[in-house]
Image: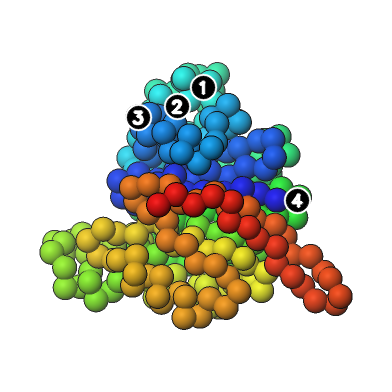
Amino acid sequence: MALFIASLNSGSNGNCYYIANGDTAVLIDAGISCKETEKRMKRLGLSLKKVKAIFITHEHTDHIFGVERLSKKYQLPVYITPATLLLGKLKIEEHLVRSFQKDEHIQVGELAIIPFAKIHDAIDAHSFVVTDHDVRVGVFTDIGLADENLINHFAQCHAAFLESNYDEHMLENGSYPWPLKNRIRGGRGHLSNKQALQIFLNHRPTYMSHLFLAHLSRQNNTPKKAKELFDAVAKQTKIIVAPRDKPTALYQIRSSIKMNNRFVIENTQLQLFQ
């Protein structure tokens, strides 16, 4: 079995992540416009006709900006908690709203999606793990602290989108006002490069083939800083920085298979667009 994954956009200007098996796809967040989502999926050779649902992590604009139009145009169910729907002031057709609770197992075709509560300054924030049989991919962004929930799920993933939002030195010495700096690093905002690295070093499973560094700050981080930090300790894990203005390549994620008493990681980069 395999999952096919890509970031369509990642950052404070919009977040949207594509995860699919051979028959069914879901989007985690819809923070870019419907038109831009269509454009980026077409660029990757993907069709929205394969997408069967949208899952919303929380109500911040960079995660919900395009969800109303996408849902209406393609008649896509939106999995969202009642509190997030209310606070986000979203107008989604009633028959397309699907409420969920933390730790609930949601089935969309052959995909199993598990939401779990996360620490972030939003009303009812969740992260998601998407599974197809024995292949697991997690979307772990907008996190203030790595709690037991995050660690347990991260430690079981073959691939993950992990927030690496800011470089501590750049944030400290940057132009942001102090209240915003303290909001970002105060335990309910975002993970720094070093915090994300500790999660990776301490809890990465041996079979994790891909790690996407996500939600990088434009002002307080650089792709080069983040990638170099992780590349130095990545070993067999491929490190990809998810850009804030274009999609990543589409990647195929497979589970580890046992051959000749050794575990071999199968992974393939399908397409790459500069």
Instruction: Specify few, some or many for label 1: CA neighbours under 10 Å numbering under 14, 14-19, or 20 or more.
Output: few
18 sits to left or right of 209:
left
- Amino acid type, residue under disc 2 in the picture: Leu
Q: Nearer the viewer, mark 1 or mark 3?
A: 1
Q: Label 3 is placed on what type of residue?
A: Lys
Q: Nearer the viewer, residue 54 or 258?
A: 258
* x and y, in percent, of residue 171 in the image: 23, 69
User: What residue appears at the point 47 percent right and 75 percent down from the top-left corner?
Assistant: 231
Measure how far apart labels 4 and 3 are at the Cα level.
39 Å
Counting from the top left corner in percent of width and height, residue 159 is at 59, 60
The kind of secondary structure element at disc 3 is: loop
Q: Would residue 141 be found to the left or right of residue 88 on screen?
A: right
Residue 67 coordinates in the image, percent (x, y): 42, 31
- Mark pair 1, 2: CA separation: 6 Å
Give me the disc on residue 89: 3
Tag 1: amino acid: Tyr
The residues bearing labels 3 and 2 have C-alpha atoms spaced at a distance of 16 Å
Mark 4 or 2 closer to N-term? Answer: 4
Q: Which residue is mark 4?
A: 1
- How many neighbours does mark 2 have within 10 angstroms: few (below 14), some (14-19), or many (20 or more)? many
Instruction: Specify few, some or many for label 4: CA neighbours under 10 Å numbering under 14, 14-19, or 20 or more.
Output: few
**Left or right: 271 in relation to 70:** right
List the residue tagged with mark 1. 74
| Residue placed furthest toward the right | 260
Pointer 4 with pointer 2, Cβ within 8 A = no
Badge 4 element: loop
- Image marks 1 and 3: residues in contact by CB distance under 8 Å: no
**Residue to which mark 2 is pinned:** 70
Dot 4 or dot 3: first in sequence order is 4
